[in-house]
Image (tube, rainbow, N blue to C red):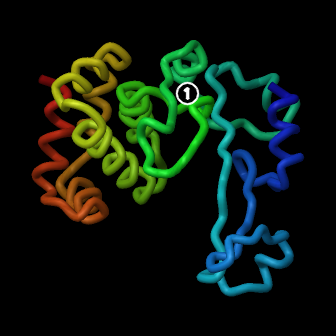
Amino acid sequence: MGGSIERIGELGYSRSRFGFVKNFHRETGERLSEDEANELPLHDTFEVFIDIIPDTSELDSFEDAFGFRPPSEPLLKKAFDGNCEPLSGYVDWRVSDSVKIAEPSLLAAMKIRSAPDRDKNHKRVKDLADLHALLWYVKDVSEIQKEVTTYVTGRTLDRLERCTGSKLFENAANLLQIDPELVRESILRLKT
């Protein structure tokens, strides 16, 4: 694990709160140093973050080695064990088939697990928007809903339901530019 994290630094990323960040000029796409990025107005730059999210909740040795305790997601182990697919099947741009992404139902399950623990409302809104998109736009909705329930329990779905409400559904729908009722129905339908 340590070697992988060190290689991220070698790619020009700087340490951030839970991982690494790299700055770019918004118009040219050129890499910027932290000092260069700080000299420009925020609207002229964008940041690419790599958050470190281990696949275990046993983080004492991680914190000892790297100086911070990141959030963890045990479901990531399933992605590392092969529940992933080539990214090229999901994007319009050219990318090597060796670049993988966790399968859609596994990604959806991770969103279900993370949303209730989000301490920032905009992160929870994004999780719900992402979850709706995964449920409706990637593959047949009934198929992905069935697959998702192999990764999460009814108790986990109850936690998701308790953390949502009409305002949250409305904000996620605004982000997606769709009717809030569609988002509410797709999320709550997971429990049926």
Residue 98 in the figure: left or right of residue 3? left
Classed neighbour count for the residue bearing mark 1: other residues with Cα under 10 Å, few (<14), some (14–19), many (≥20): some
Q: Residue at x 32, y 47 (%)?
A: 128
Observer-nearest residue: 4 or 113? 4
Quarter-of-image position of residue 43: bottom right
Is any atom of residue 70 visible in this view? yes
Query: Residue 164's spot in the image, x, y percent?
Result: 26, 46
Q: How many marks?
A: 1
Residue visible at 23% across and 59% down?
173
Q: Is residue 163 visible?
A: no
Of the residues shown, which amino acid type is indicated by label 1?
A: Glu
| 152 sits left or right of 132 in the view | right
Observer-nearest of 112 and 140:
140
Q: Quadrant of the C terminus?
A: top left
Q: As displayed, is residue 48 above or below residue 81?
A: below
Local secondary structure at mark 1: loop
Question: In the rendered image of this protein, does residue 31 appear above or below residue 16?
Answer: below
Residue 29 falls left or right of residue 108: right
Residue at x-position 26% and y-position 55%: 168
Residue in view at x 35 percent, y 19 percent = 152
Q: Give the residue at mark 1.
A: 73
x and y percent of residue 118 in the render?
46, 46
Residue 137 in which image quadrant: top left
Q: Is residue 171 above or below residue 148?
A: below
Q: x, y (%) of residue 144?
A: 26, 26
- Which of these two is toward me, 172 or 3? 3
Q: Position of residue 130 (x, y in %)?
A: 36, 46
Direction from residue 19 to residue 154 in the image, left or right: left
Q: Quadrant of the N terminus?
A: top right
Q: Compared with residue 192, is residue 23 higher up or lower down, i.e. above or below?
A: below
